[in-house]
Image (tube, rainbow, N blue to C red):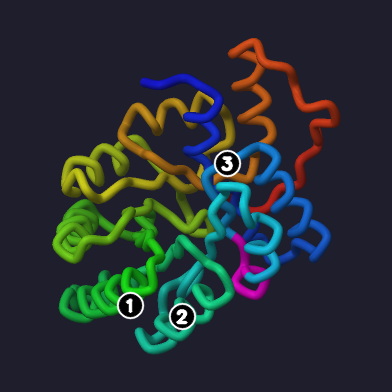
Amino acid sequence: MDFTYEAIAKTIDHSLLNPTLTWTDLERGCHLARDYQVASVCIMPFAVKHCAEILKGSGVKTGTTIGFPHGGHTTETKLAEAMAAIDDGGEELDMVINISKALSGDWAYVRHDIHHLTHAIHARGAKLKVIFENCYLNDHQKIALCEICGEIGVDWVKTSTGYGSGGATDEDLILMRKHSPAKVQVKAAGGVRTLDRLLEVRALGATRCGATQTVAILEEAKHRLGMAAAPESPAKERSTGLY
């Protein structure tokens, strides 16, 4: 497994989803992500346009959420959210499945929801991460979702929102990697707060993880690699969610 600073940083989607974050917090988080060269920022939808402006030319992707955090929006509402996000500069969108429909066994609805979002988002040149919220699902339901997402061709399947009753577990990551085709990547969210945990989820097949403790993770990576720490590394990085 590649242990370079770039490989570690490009595993992280820096999460800025806590509703109590101020505009100053959001701006600071975007600049932090740019400075540390993470994979992307996942920010609240209203701030996507400003985030994209800050990240322009940096190589760090602008991301946001769709149907967040419970997935109960209609497909039409999710589509409208997605198109607005892409118009504002969103490049990677994290959509929550309709959890109620999955628990009810209405797989036709779930498939329709994911299919329409995937088709519309890919047509605009953006990528889609589908959030299962595994803490509410059994293994049969998780496998069904992996199979649906694989058939449709989503870009990532994702364990959690970070706001449910549980986050990324080893068992779920193993299951999702096993039951998803190679072309579908896996994202871990919820509980990835240290470098060691990030390395563990990478070893289990996750190519991305949602994180709020980005500074702590990447400063530890620099330390282990013998790199210089950031001159004014914010030691008290404000928590931006449950990731």
Asked if disc 3 and disc 2 are in contact, CB closer than 8 Å, the reply is no
Type of the residue with mark 3: Val
Q: How many tags in the picture?
A: 3
Asked if disc 3 and disc 1 are in contact, CB closer than 8 Å, the reply is no
Residue 191 vs residue 61, the one in the foreground: 61
User: Separation of disc 3 and disc 2 at Cα?
Assistant: 24 Å
Q: Start and end of the magenta stretch?
A: 43-48
Residue 132 is left or right of residue 208, and the answer is: left
> Does 239 appear in magenta?
no
Type of the residue with mark 1: Ala
Residue 95 is left or right of residue 122, and the answer is: right
Q: Secondary structure at mark 3?
A: loop
Task: Determine the residue positioned at 28% across, 77% down.
Answer: 101
Residue labelled with disc 2: 83
Type of the residue with mark 2: Met
Asked if disc 2 and disc 1 are in contact, CB closer than 8 Å, the reply is yes
View extreme (top): residue: 226
Figure quadrant of residue 47: bottom right
Residue 131 vs residue 87, the one in the foreground: 87
Q: Position of residue 144 (x, y in %)?
A: 16, 60
Figure quadrant of residue 113: bottom left
Q: Position of residue 140 (x, y in %)?
A: 17, 56
Predominant secondary structure, magenta span: helix
First in residue order: circle 3 vs circle 1 = 3
Residue 38 image label:
3
Residue labelled with disc 1: 120
Task: Determine the residue positioned at 44% across, 87% down.
Answer: 77
First in residue order: circle 2 vs circle 1 = 2
View extreme (front): residue: 57
Quadrant of the frame with the N terminus = top left
Q: Secondary structure at mark 2?
A: helix
